Image (cartoon, rainbow, N blue to C red):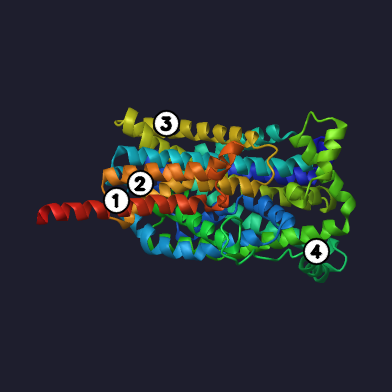
Amino acid sequence: MTTCLTVLPLPDLAIIALYLLGMIGVGFYFSRKNTDAGEYSTGSGSIPGWAIGISIYATFLSSNTFLGVPGKAFGGNWNAFVFSISMPLAAWVAVKYFVPFYRSTGEISAYTHFEKRFGPWARTYAVVCFLLTQLARMGSVFFGIALSLQALTGISMKTIMIVMGISIILYTVSGGIKAVIWTEVVQGIVKTLGAMLIIYLIVTNVPGGAKEIINIGKADNKFSLGSFSLNFTEPTFWVILLYGFFINLNNFGMDQNYIQRYHTAKSTQAARKSVWLCVYMYVPASFLFFIIGSCLYAYYSQHPDLVMTLKQQVIAERMPHATTAQAADALSKLTPADYGDKVMPHFMVTKIPQGLVGVIIAAILSAAMSTISSGMNSSATVFVEDIYKRYFKPDLTSRKLLRTLHICTVIFGVAGMVCGIGMIGVKSILDIWWKLSGIFAAGMLGLFLLGFMSTRTKNHEAIVASVIGVVVIAWLTFSSLLPPQYGMLRSTIDTNMIIVLGTLSILLVGIVLTKAKAKKEQEAINA
């Protein structure tokens, strides 16, 4: 393998080093003002709405988008763009109901009200679901950034994750939520400009330019949004629309990453505007990354010899101990979907001129660091508020609380790295993240909506509904592992429907049980 110094020229290394030092510098700048836990977690509610909006946008636009979306478009079509189309629908619900609700509670954690509504078990259950979601998110983002940088440097993915993880931990621990938000403002701008630069470079390297890219895409049906049939066994347009609506509803209404930002705003109106700013920025930005995937597909269609290198990398990761014959057989069966995540890093290392590679890498680092830093800060805040203070140390002093937040931030950063290392070799970054987020988010979103929409639902009905919902989620997730003799019990529903069906099962069962109980009580009164 080549080394970092032989692959990346000095100007590119200098750009990357300056970017990392700049991000760490921001963290240490804000560390001077972090004298208490409130400042660390909410910034004392003094951050302007436009900065919060760009920050939320930057969290959405992770390396899963930067690398996973072009890989998805390369290996398939634009079906996943339907996820972005669903975002305004979820944002409207969030702005109308969720933002004012959280602002009125005054609680830093998104899950404290679960205990007030249903009891301690509900709060703990929601926190566990959230923390699992964050570990999955951070892991997939760590994996995505390592995937690209390995192609550029020749350094092992594990080493890359560790080095980047240390950098992110430094500025997140020292600077708190203010460092997270203001670094994300910079990162959001950098990665958007980076996407535009990548499109320009690819188009100029394709003979025939944009016209030929469109012709190749049309010929191979690369611009399709998916089937419009009402078929829920595959990722049709409607399946992804439903998935996107529910997962974005979870993001805006249940995810501590975003709820915590609502509290950093100066007013409820500013918080609402930040959500819409995120949507206005993310939808067109995600469109850019689908364009990148289609451009890459056209480029590699014109250079099929380059694809062999990508296929060999996939086999080396998935089958490190395979014989020559086994590797050759597996190589012949690979499809574009198997190596889609590798095309952009490969293009960068082979076609992007000196000096610009550093800019592109800085953009990819921005995509990863913004999401990971948010996840670390919000995970630490939730764990300390809802678990540590609730069950172990309710009387923490301000100084000890701040120290505990620092320690937990480090722990969750390391845990995210470990999850990323465990994902090495997966087929698609976007696929694995969508599946894991759907599984973990369904349980807490269903319970939240039940408490929010059905004010008469009590603890007993909520417990029964949650148990039934978890059973439904488990069946949809694991029934494919059943032995052949139990084949009739396997789910044929597309995995993107897990969050939809899991959420609805908890919500509807809870409402039915509540109405049945009310009817029974009324009959008893009448009798």
Marks 4 and 1, Cα distance to the nearest angstrom? 58 Å
Q: 22 and 83: which one is in front?
A: 83
Marks 3 and 2, Cα distance to the nearest angstrom? 35 Å
Q: Mark 1 points at which residue?
A: 513
Marks 2 and 1, Cα distance to the nearest angstrom? 8 Å
Q: 230 and 260: which one is in front?
A: 230
Please tell me which of labels 4 and 1 falls first in the chain.
4
Quadrant containing the N terminus is top right
Q: Quadrant of residue 477?
A: top right
Q: Where is residue 377 in the image (x, y as percent from the top left)?
A: 48, 41
SS for tag 4?
Answer: helix
Q: Quadrant of residue 33?
A: top left
Q: Position of residue 453 (x, y in %)?
A: 32, 57
- Residue 452 vs 34, above or below: the answer is below
Q: 518 and 210: which one is in front?
A: 518
Q: Which of marks 4 and 3 is in front?
A: 4
Residue 9 circle label: none
Residue 67 appears left or right of 450: right
Evaluate if marks 4 and 1 touch, with contact meaning CB atoms under 8 Å apart: no
Q: Which amino acid does label 1 sit on?
A: Leu
Q: Which amino acid does label 2 sit on?
A: Ala
Q: Name the residue under label 4.
A: 203
